[in-house]
């Protein structure tokens, strides 16, 4: 091939006999509060190692959100911060918020608390589909709180949670009626909101075990009856996927009784919030679980499933793996870099198989390491 070729096409470089496209990505990095800065730092380190090895460049635009934004600008998310996130190719988030009840951030109106920044960015970026995988690592099976006969050979599910509708975003107010205070939250879902997230769930199921469990409360709620109807319509386009409907209270029970029955769980915002905590708990390792929040296109926000853990912040003991695996999800979903994502996931599995553990997943006979060292160990195996 003409040696001048690579000079003519910017972004191409020669790797042996291959010509590989060298890509450059801009990532909005939101460190946030608590352990956020430490875990995001480790995820960036891992991304940079991927960049070096596979010839990509990741540029980071640091964005303030949550408590740190409140301290700096008086609001949990500025318009400029949202704009920076919008212009990026993807968003990487650590965690936001302090101890609930922390007077500095919580004695203010709900729309000025750290979590309001998270809701604003979800809505502002139209991130309606929240993907939360929950699976049992063979090496960490000892941390699972369920009995061996329930765990069997392990479980592997993905919760697809609607993220920009329902009770979180419905009209709410508190008033006094006849001298008695009363508060109202409204749960609204449109057909369109249900359909687009249902399509995501079925698309994901097509790449997995082809089963969707749609979770609702159709024996009580109108919104759930509409949910069930629209999901059934979407299911017609995916004849290979088995659709099952389950009431949310039953689902909470089934998750601890027989978690192996689940492949993809599709549900609305509030139910998904609750069930995803339950699902992550039964893996015994919330410090390991990543998540992605996606819009209509390939754009997404990637964050660990756990919170900001302010009590252990700055001590170099937090587990960075969930954030690192979230970065892997970013490579896979937003950038189509599957082999790079595989490289991160393989490196994590290797480190665990070699017996390295952060304190949250520590077990007898294993080697305890801190946040920074865990990040280094994973980089070395990429
Ligand atoms: C989550 C969190 C958030 C939510 C909070 C922090 C607002 O619990 O991402 O699950 O309820 O969505
Ligand atoms: Mg939650």
Image (tube, helix red, strand yellow):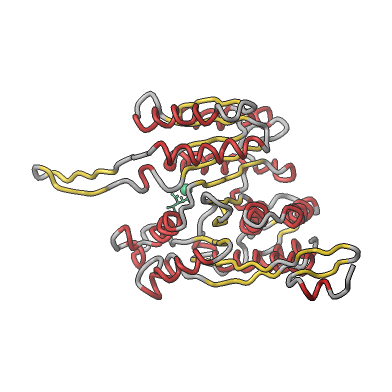
Q: Position of residue 182 (x, y in %)?
A: 19, 44
Quarter in which the C terminus is drawn: bottom right
Tell which of 206 and 136 is nearer to you: 206
- Residue placed most toward the observer, 154 or 147: 154
| Between 212 and 312, the one nearer to me in the picture | 212
Residue sitting farthest toward the left: 178
Q: Nearer the viewer, residue 138 or 45?
A: 45
Q: In this image, 248 relative to 142: left or right?
A: left
From the top left corner, tell me how far across and down residue 369 is, in percent. 71, 62
The answer, for residue 303, to whether it is visible in the render is no
> How many numbered marks have been drawn onto this rendered protein structure?
0
**Residue 240: x and y, percent?**
65, 27
Residue 54 vertical placement versus 238 (above, below): below
Q: Residue at x 63, y 60 (%)?
A: 320
Quadrant in the rendering for residue 227: top left
In the picture, measured across the screen, residue 199 lies left or right of residue 166, that is right
Q: What residue is shown at x 66% (from left), y 57% (from top)?
A: 335
Identify whether 259 is placed above or below 123.
Answer: above
Lateral position of residue 343 relative to residue 287, left or right: right
User: Which of the 4 image quarters holds residue 36?
Assistant: bottom right
Residue 229 lies, with reference to residue 86, above or below; the image says above
Q: Residue at x 58, y 35 (%)?
A: 202
Q: Residue at x 69, y 35 (%)?
A: 154
Q: Quadrant of the N terminus?
A: bottom right
Residue 71 picture location, percent across and down: 39, 73
Residue 361 visible to an observer of this rendering: yes
């Amino acid at each position: 091939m003409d040696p001048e070729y690579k000079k003519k096409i910017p972004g191409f470089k020669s790797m042996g006999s291959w010509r590989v496209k060298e890509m450059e990505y801009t990532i909005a990095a939101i460190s946030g509060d608590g352990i956020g800065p430490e875990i995001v730092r480790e995820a960036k380190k891992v991304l940079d190692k991927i960049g070096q090895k596979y010839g990509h460049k990741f540029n980071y635009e640091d964005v303030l959100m949550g408590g740190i934004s409140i301290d700096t600008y008086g609001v949990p998310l500025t318009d400029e911060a949202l704009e920076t996130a919008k212009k990026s190719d993807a968003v990487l988030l650590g965690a936001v918020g302090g101890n609930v009840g922390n007077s500095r951030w919580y004695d203010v109106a709900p729309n000025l608390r750290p979590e309001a920044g998270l809701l604003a960015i979800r809505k502002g970026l139209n991130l309606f589909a929240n993907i939360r995988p929950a699976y049992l690592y063979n090496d960490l099976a000892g941390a699972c709180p369920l009995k061996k006969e329930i765990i069997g050979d392990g479980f592997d599910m993905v919760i697809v949670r609607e993220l920009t509708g329902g009770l979180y975003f419905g009209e709410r107010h508190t008033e006094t009626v006849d001298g008695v205070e009363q508060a109202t939250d409204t749960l609204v879902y449109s057909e369109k909101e249900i359909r687009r997230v249902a399509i995501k769930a079925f698309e994901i199921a097509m790449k997995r075990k082809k089963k969707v469990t749609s979770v609702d409360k159709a024996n009580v709620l109108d919104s759930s009856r509409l949910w069930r109807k629209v999901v059934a319509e979407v299911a017609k386009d995916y004849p290979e996927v088995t659709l099952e409907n389950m009431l949310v209270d039953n689902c909470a029970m089934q998750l601890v009784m027989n978690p192996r029955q689940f492949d993809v769980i599709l549900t609305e915002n509030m139910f998904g919030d609750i069930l995803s905590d339950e699902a992550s708990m039964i893996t015994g390792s919330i410090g390991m679980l990543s998540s992605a929040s996606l819009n209509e296109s390939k754009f997404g926000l990637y964050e660990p499933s756990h919170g900001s853990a302010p009590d252990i912040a700055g001590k170099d003991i937090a587990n960075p793996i969930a954030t690192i695996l979230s970065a892997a999800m970013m490579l896979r979903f937003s950038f189509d870099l599957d082999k790079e994502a595989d490289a991160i996931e393989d490196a994590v599995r290797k480190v665990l198989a070699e017996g390295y553990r952060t304190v949250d997943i520590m077990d007898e006979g294993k080697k305890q390491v801190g946040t920074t060292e865990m990040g280094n160990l994973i980089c070395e195996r990429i």
